[in-house]
Amino acid sequence: MNYLLVFEKMIVTIILLLLYNRLSGLRKLAPMTTFDTIGNLVIGAISGTTLLNERVKPKDIFVFVLIWLGILLSIRYLKGTHRVIRNMIDGQPIFLMRDGRLYPEMFRKINTDNKSIESLLRNKGVTGIHTLDEIIIEPNGQISYTTSKKDDFSQVLIDRGQIHFNTLTIINKDEKWLRQTLATHGYSDISTLFCVEYANETFWIYVDSTDKSGVTYQKIKLSA
């Protein structure tokens, strides 16, 4: 066994993974999505089957891993620019409860039970399902919720120039309302908006910018 060769291939793999982490902007904000898991499994398979194979040179593993990382970066870019592709890969939120109404069929769809959901909610300080208005399983597998007091929670309607249609449904609004309301206040081009939050008939708007000092929000209170 040529341990020096194995060491060289391990270094090449680590360097490429670090480069991928930097280019993709990955940070540990949430549990891995299915896409992340598949990507890691394939990289592990490539590395594991080539590290101990003395016929595979460091330059070969460099090419193998580089090709796969290139595919991952391309898919990640498409996810960030095309809502349909993002929904196909990551999926959409699953509502177990909405407007105080529990949906047993959704529990069966994700093969879970009330006891499991109750346990997860208790870890978040929720005293009981009956105190909630919505229970949501996010695409990354996390559970989120809102209480019956909806006004206490803001909703992100626009994220990096893309409308969150599921969120519009939650607040009983549509795309036409959103575009018209923003245009009335001088924001006709949604692609220039980095983040738009909404709660209590109020918008908090962050315009996209490359300014390293950051941007502050503009607060817009809608008339009743």
Image (tube, rainbow, N blue to C red):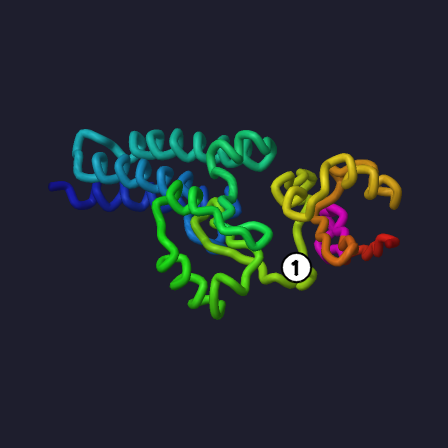
Q: Residue at x 51, y 44 (%)?
A: 93
Q: Secondary structure at mark 1?
A: helix
State the image coordinates of residue 69 (x, y, percent, origin top left): 41, 35
Tell me if mark 1 has few (under 14), some (14-19) or many (20+) residues whose alpha carbon lies within 10 angstroms of its own: some
Residue 146 vs residue 123: left or right? right
Q: Residue at x 54, y 65 (%)?
A: 131
Residue at the spot of label 1? 150
Residue 64 vs residue 93: left or right? left
Q: Nearer the viewer, residue 124 or 30?
A: 124
Q: Nearer the viewer, residue 135 or 215?
A: 135
Question: Predominant secondary structure in magenta?
Answer: loop
Q: Tell me if residue 185 can be seen.
A: yes
Q: Residue at x 45, y 32 (%)?
A: 70
- Quadrant of res 59: top left
Q: Residue at x 44, y 43 (%)?
A: 106
Q: Quadrant of the N terminus?
A: top left
Residue 210 is one of the magenta-drawn residues: yes
Q: Tell me if residue 16 can be seen.
A: no
Which residues are the magenta region? Answer: 205-215
Task: In the rendered view, tell whether residue 21 sits above or below residue 153.
Answer: above
Furthest residue toward left: 1
Q: Amino acid at mark 1?
A: Lys
Q: Nearer the viewer, residue 94 or 195?
A: 94
Q: Quadrant of the C terminus?
A: bottom right
Residue 214 is one of the magenta-drawn residues: yes
State the image coordinates of residue 120 (x, y, percent, origin top left): 41, 61
State the image coordinates of residue 41 (x, y, percent, origin top left): 31, 40
State the image coordinates of residue 83 (x, y, percent, origin top left): 59, 33
Residue 84 vs residue 221: left or right? left
